Amino acid sequence: MSQQEDYSSFFGREEKPIESEPELEAYREKIIAAERESGGIRALIILLNAIFFFLLTEMGYFEPEKTETHTILAYVILGISFVYSCFTYLFKPYERYPVMLASYFSYISDMMFITLWLYATGGFHSPFYIMWYVAIVVVAFRFNWRIVWATSTLYVVCYVALVLLLSQVHSASEVVDLSLRCMYIVAIGYIASLISKETYVQTTEKLQLKNITRSLLHTQRELEEKKEALEELTALLEDRVTERTRDLESNAKNFSLLLDVIDLITWTTTPEGAVNYHNKAWDAFFKGSVDGNDLSAFVHPDDVAEVKRKWLEVKETGMTGSGKFRWKRHDGQWRDMQVEIICLKNEEEQIIMWIGTAADITA
């Protein structure tokens, strides 16, 4: 039998076979832990059997006329079983030989030990027949219900065969007593199997809940990490935006200072053409008497149509435009102006502003 089959038989409650390496490793660890813990319990039970056997012998319970006792064989069985239990507990041979963890190995070895032990301590008259009950409970809590039923049947057959072989059942009361003992083996196995099944279901639900909780905690940690990363990124972007805003404000201030020292009348517009800035030369020319977005307020009526045509042409092509037009100065005089319009674009060739200049060429 393979390791996988051995482990599957140990936890026979699974509906599907173990396939993945992580599952196989998990089953292996559980089996080894259970076997390690049960080794000490076996040694304790054997030691208690030895003590009670000695006490009952000293009290005269095992007298020849009462029971057919093989004292030497009884102590030999106890000694061998105790040494085996201590050996498996200390040296863990089942880690090297997984067959020792298989279901058939467990119930066959227990059946042989109990049968020989009962034979040595009086057969039907032995008070240690309760070992069948202990063994079937151990099987029920380790294996699935199919194995429990099969083991119960095997234990009953072995016990009845031992009693019949020794010819110890003669009266009707003894037959009833034997029948009750066999029924208790099956009943205790069935009850322990139900308890084990319920315990298994509860354990499975707890494990599922634990896995869900672990998954939620892991997700929460991931969300917290992402939140922290997002906060760091947001702070970085805010710093960059603040720094960029300061740079733009500084550049705008420097740009304004540059335009103010130019003798030419200079103004800027939005990409759509709305005037949003003009320099000191503009203020000196108009003295605040005009709105830069109202051409009729300072352009000669005969030139307004041409100015609009030129402006539309420049906006459509995105090219530099120029022309000579008459502007009304703040004192009411019409002056001949050489007007230039240039387009300022970014790296993506998108218009970010228009810059216009006008020079008085009347003289």
Image: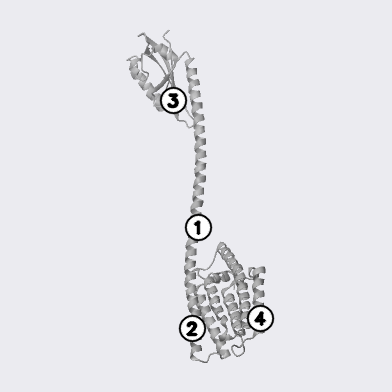
Q: Which of 75 and 290 is in front in this view?
A: 75
How far is the residue under mark 4 from the one under mark 3? 108 Å
| Residue 305 left/right relative to 52 | left
On the image, numbered disc 1 is attached to which residue?
Answer: 211
Asked which quadrant contains residue 98, the reply is bottom right
Residues at circles 3 and 1 in contact by the CB criterion of under 8 Å:
no
Q: Nearer the viewer, residue 202 or 18?
A: 202
Disc 4 crowd, CA 10 A, few/some/many (<14, 14-19, 20+) = some
On the image, numbered disc 2 is attached to which residue?
Answer: 180
The numbered disc on residue 353 is 3
Q: Does residue 316 sit above or below 38 in this rendering?
A: above
How far is the residue under mark 1 from the one under mark 2? 45 Å
Who comes first in sequence, dot 4 or dot 3?
A: 4
Residues at circles 1 and 2 in contact by the CB criterion of under 8 Å:
no
Who comes first in sequence, dot 3 or dot 1?
A: 1
How far is the residue under mark 2 from the one under mark 4? 29 Å
| Residue 64 left/right relative to 269 | right
Q: Which amino acid type is shown beneath numbered disc 1? A: Asn
Who comes first in sequence, dot 1 or dot 4?
A: 4
Q: Check the picture and name the quadrant holding the C terminus.
A: top left
Residues at circles 2 and 4 in contact by the CB criterion of under 8 Å:
no
Q: Which amino acid type is shown beneath numbered disc 2? A: Leu
Q: Does the rendering let one see residue 179? A: yes
